[in-house]
Amino acid sequence: MKRKLNYLFPILLLLGTAGCVKTSNDPSTIDIPVGNFTGQFTRIHLNPNTNKLDTIKANITLNMGTATGYVVGGDTTNHAASYGSYVVDGQNIAFSDHTLPSTTTITTPPVKIHLNGIYQYQYAPPVLQIGVQNDTISFFYNLIAK
């Protein structure tokens, strides 16, 4: 009997300490982007007629607050100055632009690009990267906290 306990004790010790191992993947802690960011917006579009890529870039500002929502400013030549609300889940940000024209549809997009819809993001302060990629068009925001 004593011999069986000698083998059983190390196994129980190993199982008991396995539950105490600290993991760094805590899903309850999400870095929610808040504050003032500045950086570059890039749109890459595949023209179906020429099968070539065209690119638009703009230097923008993005102010984000959990209670106040977001505001886009900066170079508004191709990107709309806008504001709205947002929700973060740890991998995606869903932006709801309150200035998006009511006539906007898939076939009639707005003249200027609006920060609206669901984007993937990475936030490792101070760097915030937001992007969405489809078959013919991609939007990327490379921003740094001010």
Image: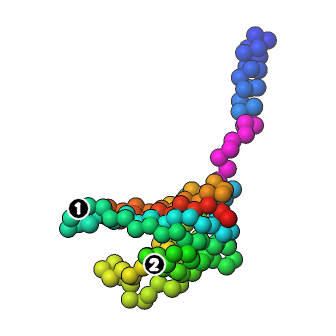
Residue at the image point whose x is 57% and y is 81% from the top: 83
* Magenta highlight: main SS: loop
The question of residue 26 being in magenta is answered with: yes
Residue at the image point whose x is 46% and y is 76% from the top: 79
Q: Where is residue 40 in the image (x, y as percent from the top left)?
A: 52, 64
Q: In which quarter of the image is residue 62?
A: bottom right
Residue at the image point whose x is 66% and y is 69% from the top: 36
Q: In which quarter of the image is residue 67?
A: bottom right
Farthest right residue in view: 2
- Total numbered labels placed on residues in the image: 2
Q: In this view, does 138 lie to the left or right of 2?
A: left
Q: Which colour scheme is used?
A: rainbow
Q: Is 83 or 53 nearer to us in this picture?
A: 53
**Gap between marks 1 and 2 measured at Cα:** 25 Å
Amino acid marked by disc 1: Asn
Mark 2: which secondary structure?
loop
| Magenta residue span | 19-27
Q: Which disc number belongs to residue 51? A: 1
Q: Say whether residue 76 is visible.
A: yes
